[in-house]
C-alpha cells in the first residue's frame, strides 16, 4: 500500500523488495539503537537524553554503526534547535557526528537528510537543504523524515499542493506522525526559528 501511494505521487520507480538493509552484525547494538529511536520519537528532552545514552551504548558495541551516529546527530540537533542545550555545543556535535556518518556510508538516506537539516538550521541554505532532502528521497522514497521535511520546505516556498503531497506520503508511511506533526510546543519553537531564518534570508 505504501509503495502504491509513493508511485501515485511520484510515478513508477523500482522499490526494493527489502526496504531495510542490514545495519550491523551486533544484535545488541541494533536493539540499543531501536530503543534509542523509540525514545527520540517522544520529542521531549528527558527522552532525548535517554536516547543519547542508548545510542552511545550501541556505538560501544559497534563503532561503525552508522545509524547510531545519525541518531545521535538528530538528538543533539533537537536539543540545539529547541534550546535545551547551548546552540554552539549542540550543533557542533551534530555536525561532527553527521560527517562521521557520511564517511562511513554516503549512500544512506539518513546521511543526506541530516546534511539537509544542517544546511537549513545552521547555514540558512534553503537550496542545499532541498537538494539533500531530495537525494534522501531518491535513495529511499519511503524515508518518512525526508518526506515530512520536504513538506515543510515546500510550505516555506508557498507551494502548498506539493507540500501536501509530501505530507500525505509521510502520513501514509507512518500514520502515528499525525499526532505530533506541527502540533507540539516544540513545533512552535521551530516555527519561531524558521521565521527568524526567513527574515535573515529576506534581509540578505
Image: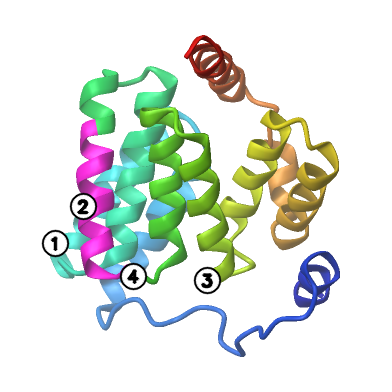
Tell me, yes or no, whether the highlighted magenta stretch contains residue 111.
no
- Numbered tag placed on residue 30 in the rendering: 4
Image x and y of residue 178, in percent: 75, 43
Label 1 environment density (alpha carbons within 10 Å; few <14, some 14–19, many ≥20): few
Question: Quick one: 36 or 143, which is closer to the camera?
Answer: 143
Question: Quick one: 194 or 189, which is closer to the camera?
Answer: 194
Q: CA distance from mark 1 to mark 4?
A: 12 Å
Secondary structure that dominates the magenta span: helix
Classify 137 as above or below 75: below
Q: Earlier in the sequence, mark 1 or mark 3?
A: 1
Q: CA distance from mark 4 to mark 3?
A: 22 Å
117 relative position to 174: left or right: left
Tell which tag, 1 or 3, sits nearer the viewer: 3
Q: CA distance from mark 1 to mark 3?
A: 28 Å
Q: Secondary structure at mark 3?
A: helix
Q: Which residues are magenta?
A: 92-106
- Give yes or no for contact between labels 1 and 3 (Cβ–Cβ under 8 Å): no
- Give yes or no for contact between labels 4 and 3 (Cβ–Cβ under 8 Å): no
Residue designated by label 1: 60
76 relative position to 45: left or right: left
Q: Quadrant of the N terminus?
A: bottom right
Q: CA distance from mark 1 to mark 2?
A: 6 Å
Q: CA distance from mark 3 to mark 2?
A: 27 Å
x 36%, y 52%: residue: 71
Residue designated by label 2: 56
Which quadrant of the structure image shows residue 118? top left
Amino acid at each position: 500500500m505504501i509503495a502504491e501511494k509513493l508511485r501515485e505521487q511520484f510515478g513508477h520507480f523500482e522499490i526494493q523488495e527489502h526496504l531495510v538493509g542490514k545495519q550491523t552484525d551486533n544484535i545488541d547494538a541494533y536493539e540499543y539503537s531501536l530503543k534509542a529511536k523509540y525514545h527520540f520519537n517522544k520529542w521531549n528532552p528527558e527522552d532525548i537524553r535517554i536516547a543519547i545514552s542508548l545510542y552511545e551504548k550501541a556505538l560501544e558495541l559497534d563503532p561503525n554503526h552508522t545509524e547510531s551516529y545519525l541518531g545521535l546527530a538528530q538528538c543533539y540537533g533537537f536539543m540545539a534547535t529547541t534550546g535545551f542545550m547551548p546552540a554552539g555545543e549542540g550543533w557542533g556535535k551534530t555536525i561532527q557526528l553527521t560527517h562521521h556518518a557520511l564517511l562511513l556510508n554516503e549512500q544512506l538516506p539518513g546521511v543526506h537528510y541530516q546534511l539537509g537539516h544542517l544546511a537549513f538550521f545552521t547555514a540558512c541554505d534553503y537550496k542545499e537543504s532541498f537538494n539533500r532532502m531530495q537525494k534522501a528521497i531518491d535513495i529511499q522514497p519511503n524515508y518518512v523524515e525526508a518526506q515530512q521535511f520536504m513538506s515543510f520546505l515546500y510550505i516555506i516556498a508557498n507551494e502548498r499542493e506539493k507540500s501536501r503531497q509530501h505530507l500525505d506520503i509521510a502520513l501514509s508511511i507512518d500514520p502515528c506522525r499525525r499526532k505530533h506533526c506541527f502540533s507540539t510546543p516544540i513545533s512552535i519553537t521551530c516555527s519561531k526559528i524558521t521565521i527568524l531564518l526567513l527574515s535573515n534570508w529576506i534581509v540578505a
